[in-house]
Image (cartoon, coloured by chain):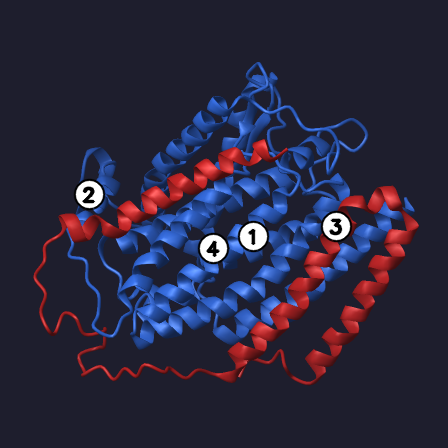
Chain colours: A blue, B red
Amino acid sequence: MVLLGADPVVETTLVQIVKAIVIFAVILQVVPVILLLERKLLGRFQQRYGPNRVGPKGALQPFADVLKLLSKESSTPTTAVPWMMAIAPVISIVTAVATLAIIPFGPQGAWGGDLGLYGIDVPIGLLYFFAFGSLAFYAFVLGGWASGSKYSFLGAMRSAAQLISYEVAIGLSLLGVAMMAGSLSLVDIVEAQGSAGKGIWFVVPQFVGFIIFMVAGFAESSRPPFDLPESDAELVAGYNTEYSGMRFGSFFMAEYIEVIVISGVATACFLGGWHGPGPEALAPLWVVLKMFAFVLFFIWIRATLPRLRYDQLMFLGWKVLLPLATLNVLVTAILLVVT
Amino acid sequence: MLKSYLPALVFLVLGVGVGVAFTFANSLLGPKRPSKVKSEPYESGLPSDVRKSFRFGVSFYLVAMLFILFDIEVVFLYPIAVRLEEVGTFALIETVVFIVLLAIAFVHVWRRGALEWK
């Protein structure tokens, strides 16, 4: 429990910088793998092969995609505001990458010394996640508005309303977890799920919170079935209609990093983070396995559920998730204090 | 204390680096063959009709206002959530009163039809 208490032990500056770069570099390599996995699995779900031309069994498909995107012309419509159109993809990447910092892969000292296997462990943990999650909103709105196309504009408005509607639900869904752990730091939250006495994964006592977090997490990352801002059938990709080449790629990559972050936060808050059988040094393995399961879940849902209608989206966000999440907070608070 | 935030700064710098590289990669590497038709905003074959001032439904404004109301709720509840078990009954009563007040507002908003998407 550290809010304003003693300073936590922190590694040397060099170690801090190196571990941040390592986490970033690894995740950057994982994104194309997830991309390929998703296309392969979607193919199988729809009884076709998926990409199988480039490299052995299509393994080099992501490289081909990146090469193709790199060799495209950068196009800016005459109606656009060029500098705003240029910074929108930067914002989307920055906000997605910044949230990577709080995913805890292991406790401090699991690999010896005072090395903490996480980007940062700060007392504001969850709030940091929400703060950068909310900033992602600007990327979509700026990008869509500055494109000067009506499809982009509609996509931007949709994504604005969708993101802020589910922001409330996702904030409330983790309150129960914060109450039970007595801390906002994700490392403390994971520790609370393994300590003697209340050593239980929060997915059990916070099951309602878990469901709300996952639903809102899908909406926050604009993944199907909540991909209304970019619904290709009616809005021809929404806010990124006018984007080409790697600028389009940035939005795409940011979406996948966001999926990884949501998986990481869900793992830490509900599935006991690094807790699992075996020695403590295996901690990151468990985190990665659990996150991988979540990523597969994201892909599975994409193949299973059809897109919502906009009024259904608003109904779910305001009339179902918000009251349910508030009730969950109330019940958790009462149970915690009374028992 | 602030030193534990240093990696966040590194992530931000890396993010900006990658973002900027991606944003300008195509201007440097890609072909440049501009044409009048290509630089028009997308429209399905018809001449595109784009005005600078887009107009959109009032429902969007309404959602934004509701968001401010209920997101503040979340922000206020977090400090209390962290200290809930230590402070005990007093914090619990505060929380319940706060949520009940908001629930009244929520019911009012619901009954006035502000949550219907039109």
Q: Label 2 neighbourhood size at 10 Å, few (<14), some (14-19), many (20+)?
A: some
| Residue linked to disc 3 | B79
| Residue linked to disc 4 | A221
When asked about the image quadrant of residue B76, the answer is: bottom right
Q: Quadrant of the C terminus of chain A?
A: top right
Say which of marks 2 and 1 sits in front: 1
Q: Kindly identify which chain the residue marked by label 2 belongs to.
A: A
Q: Are marks 2 and 3 in contact (CB under 8 Å)?
A: no
When asked about the image quadrant of residue A189, the answer is: top right
Would you say A22 lies left or right of A48 here? right
Q: Which residue is nearer to you in this view: A134 or A337?
A: A134
Inter-mark Cα distance, 2 to 1? 35 Å
Same chain letter for marks 2 and 4: yes
Q: In the rendering, at what x and y percent does residue A15 appear?
A: 48, 22
Q: In the rendering, at what x and y percent does residue A196 appear?
A: 78, 26
Looking at the rendered structure, the secondary structure element under dot 1 is helix
**Marks 4 and 1, the one that precedes in the sequence:** 1
| Residue linked to disc 1 | A131
